[in-house]
Amino acid sequence: MKKLILILFCFLLTNKLLLAQQTTLNKMKRDSIVRGYIVYVPKIYNDSIAVPLLFNFHGSGGTVYDLENNKIEADYNWLSMRTIADTAGFILVYPQASTAPDGGKYWRFGFNSAVDDIGFTAAMIDTISNKYKIDLNRVYSCGYSNGGFFSVTLACFMSDKIAAIGCVAGFQTVNNEGYCNPVHPTPVVTIHGTADNVISYYGNKTNGLQSQQDLINYWTDFNNTSKSPVKSRFPKSDSKVERSIYDKGDSCVSVEHYRVIGGGHDWFGNWGNMDINSGKVIWDFVSRYSIKGLIGCATLSSNEIKNNNMIAYPNPLGNELTVDLGSEMSKKIVLYDAYGKLVLSVILNSQKNIVDVSFLTPGMYVLHTETQTLKLIKI
């Protein structure tokens, strides 16, 4: 009997492992044409735990799936995000755009189009969640160039399924902006080079393209975030990347923008500016959110540190801790792990401070100031 139980256990464990670190080529028929998409399951996948799902939409002309010969074609942002998926544990999906009448392969937004790529995305979510254990509150989208435009389109027209988005070297069309109809506060992160000669950072209204600032204005207004961003160089003071954070939005959401000074039409970190890793920045941002807003937002509301209006957030932690000193001029904070070991001690002198906590391992931590204590969770 014991041997039978052991054999059964090994069989179940083997089945779970067979799903892990697996790349599959998938097809479905939509709009009378065969559509293709790649699904990558990370090596730490276990079907007893619901995991996030991230779509990565390629740019115009991109080919990631050879439907005729059933094979993957190389694409750098697809390959780089597989490594991130292995570490973070999300399932990565890389769909293939259909071929348009003009012969191009690009994402179409549903406006007078015979191809409904929004419906295709919804169908992929349904199909994938039937095969794998997906946390449907944590479905994310990102994209490059034309794929970035499409990611913003999903935030506009399919926000009942999409929790947060990232956009590299793309933004919002004038057409989208006029009809955009999100149903919940939607976190948005954008990355764009100021010298992009394909999709101008500054927009082109004649061609129906908004500027990056137009995109930021739309989502900060919709999310009711702060209007004056916290600005810093990223990831270090001498880099050519300027980060702007618009926080304190409804449901604790934020909008972030990474302005790559002199950057071209690039997926930064794979080519072009190497100060910033586009895939990692996107994942670090979107993973903090569910479709209900910032994960732990309710906890934050009841557990925020306050002393003369000082606030520390988010909780749970991602890779950064924001400390707003309010009317205080300076403040020392210390952080201990669950075993009482000091892991961080820093004196803050700015009104709003961003503290790097990416080195922390998942677990519980205790943050102390001179007068306050707060329990934090690192996810």
Image: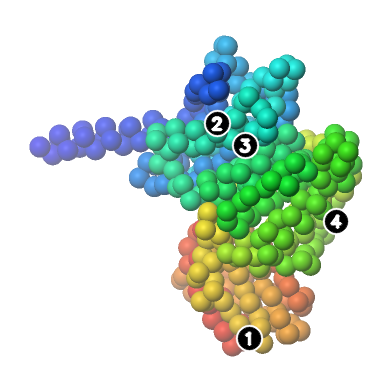
Q: Which percent across, then down, holds residue 54?
A: 56, 41
Q: Which residue is mark 2?
A: 120
Above or below residue 208? Residue 240 is below
* SS assignment at label 1: loop
Q: Residue furthest front?
A: 112
Q: Label for residue 238?
A: 4
Select label 3 or label 1 by which is in front. 3
Q: Residue at x 44, y 32 (%)?
A: 127
Q: Which percent across, then down, holds residue 125?
A: 49, 37
Q: Which residue is mark 3?
A: 56
First-in-chain label (4 vs 1): 4
Q: Residue at x 70, y 79 (%)?
A: 325
Alpha-carbon span between mark 4 and mark 3: 30 Å
Amino acid at circle 2: Phe
First-in-chain label (2 vs 4): 2
Using residue 92 as the reference point, say whether residue 237 is left or right of it. right
Above or below residue 258? Residue 20 is above
Q: Label for residue 307?
A: 1
